[in-house]
Image (spheres, rainbow, N blue to C red):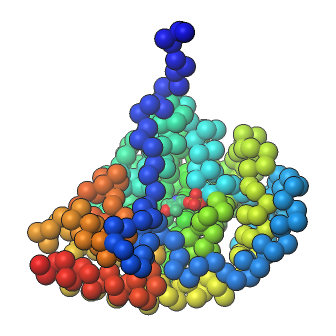
């Protein structure tokens, strides 16, 4: 037998595989999974009802172009369906973008505490990830622009950002875009857009409509409560969408995801309920935890970042303490924030339990 083994392409062995939020706790009772920014409201009943019709059709291939779903998205968002691509989660679209536009010798730029998938997508293609510093845990447009080089191919911007929960106003996104060469693709990852209620925020569709080098990505995993089905979409220029369509799998979005997402995107009442629940809890969680000495950036998403640096206690000990009580928060050391935890807004009971447990932990 030969001692040789197949070697992957450069960059791949530099990847630390993505580890999602934990789903088990060390406790024995009720478990609240607040580690992956899923919605506490479950899935829209209308979207669930769509599943009934699909069981008899599981032997048939799905619509490879996700045509009906694109029409539904286009109708709700008032965009051109031909400029939409659907994906197996928006993660797939982020990967397709890197597959298509970045390779060895190229640079992929993003903010230092930006979403982890950007770095993985760059490395998987042998490209070099470049991380711009942030100001107050917020994207710094000047820092990003100062790191653009001849080699820059893609700039990924999560707005709002995960795991910090902070955002930049649309005027800043426009300033960022204006400072980029036309051959650099600006990716506006708006996974949490539905939650944002700031008058100076825009997810980015209007910038896509007037630019050749911008794509906005969206997901059904967060506010729509369809994480398990893996379904997301992108809206970009005809040219960019054409490129991504050439390299995606021919049937990249399964039929169950398509049919369910069509109902979900039409159920805007469900979205409104989720926004209301979030609007109630983000200020309460932020104020109560600041009152305990935790540092909390203002979040516009459905999660908050808590920094233990000034409490005299460690995030790791807090994570263990909460887990023993069935409360699973996200350790975000892999995002370069070792003394922080991220908490998704849960049900009323979940949120109260976290506040009580943290009060006990920090009072010890
Ligand atoms: C959760 C998340 C996504 C996407 O997820 P999919 O489930 O792959 O659609 C994308 N970007 C950010 C910033 C996220 O937090």
Q: In the image, residue 258 lies at what x, y percent? A: 77, 64
Q: In the image, residue 147 lies at what x, y percent? A: 38, 43
Q: Is residue 360 visible?
A: yes
Pick the quarter of the image with the N terminus.
top right
Q: Is residue 329 visible?
A: no
In the image, residue 200 above or below residue 206: below
Name the one closer to the observer, 185 or 221.
Answer: 221
Which residue is pictured at 53% across the width and 9% down the height?
2
Residue 166 is drawn in which quadrant? bottom left
Which residue is pictured at 40% across the width and 83% down the height?
350
Q: Answer with left or right where residue 64 lies relative to residue 137.
A: right
Name the one closer to the observer, 346 or 125.
Answer: 346
Q: In the image, residue 252 lies at what x, y percent? A: 73, 50
Q: In the image, residue 324 lies at what x, y percent? A: 30, 71
In the image, residue 268 above or below residue 20: below
Q: Answer with left or right where residue 190 lies relative to residue 107.
A: right
Q: Quadrant of ligand 1?
A: bottom right
Pick the quarter of the image with the C terminus.
bottom left
Q: Answer with left or right where residue 247 lies relative to residue 216.
A: right
Which residue is pictured at 67% across the width and 54% down the height?
88
Q: Answer with left or right where residue 67 lies relative to residue 76.
A: right
Which residue is pictured at 74% across the width and 55% down the height?
253
Q: Residue furthest front?
A: 28
Q: Residue furthest top?
A: 2
| Figure label count | 0
In the image, residue 75 above or below residue 251: below
């Amino acid at each position: 037998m030969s001692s040789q083994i197949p070697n992957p392409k450069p960059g791949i062995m530099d990847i630390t595989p993505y580890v999602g939020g934990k789903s088990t706790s060390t406790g024995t009772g009720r478990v609240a999974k607040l580690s992956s920014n899923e919605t506490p409201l479950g899935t829209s009943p209308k979207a669930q009802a769509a599943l009934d019709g699909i069981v008899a059709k599981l032997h048939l291939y799905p619509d490879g172009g996700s045509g009906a779903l694109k029409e539904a998205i286009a109708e709700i968002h008032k965009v051109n369906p031909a400029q939409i691509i659907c994906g197996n989660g928006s993660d797939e679209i982020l990967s397709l973008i890197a597959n298509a536009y970045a390779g060895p010798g190229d640079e992929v730029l993003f903010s230092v505490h930006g979403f982890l998938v950007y770095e993985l997508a760059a490395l998987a293609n042998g490209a070099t990830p470049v991380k711009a510093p942030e100001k107050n845990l917020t994207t710094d447009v000047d820092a990003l622009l100062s790191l653009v080089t001849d080699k820059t191919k893609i700039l990924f911007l999560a707005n709002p950002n995960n795991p910090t929960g902070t955002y930049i106003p649309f005027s800043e996104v426009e300033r960022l875009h204006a400072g980029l060469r036309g051959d650099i693709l600006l990716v506006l990852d708006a996974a949490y857009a539905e939650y944002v209620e700031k008058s100076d925020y825009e997810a980015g569709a209007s910038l896509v409509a007037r630019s050749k080098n911008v794509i906005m990505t969206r997901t059904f995993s967060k506010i729509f409560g369809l994480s398990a089905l893996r379904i997301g979409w992108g809206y970009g220029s005809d040219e960019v969408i054409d490129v991504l369509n050439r390299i995606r799998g021919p049937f990249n979005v399964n039929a169950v995801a398509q049919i369910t997402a069509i109902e979900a995107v039409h159920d805007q009442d469900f979205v409104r309920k989720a926004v209301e629940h979030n609007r109630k809890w983000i200020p309460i969680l932020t104020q109560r935890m600041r009152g305990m000495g935790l540092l909390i950036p203002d979040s516009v998403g459905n999660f908050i970042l808590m920094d233990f640096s000034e409490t005299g206690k460690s995030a790791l000990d807090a994570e263990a303490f909460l887990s023993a009580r069935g409360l699973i928060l996200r350790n975000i050391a892999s995002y370069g924030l070792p003394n922080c935890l991220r908490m998704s807004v849960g049900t009323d009971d979940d949120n109260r339990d976290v506040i009580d447990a943290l009060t006990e932990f920090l009072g010890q």
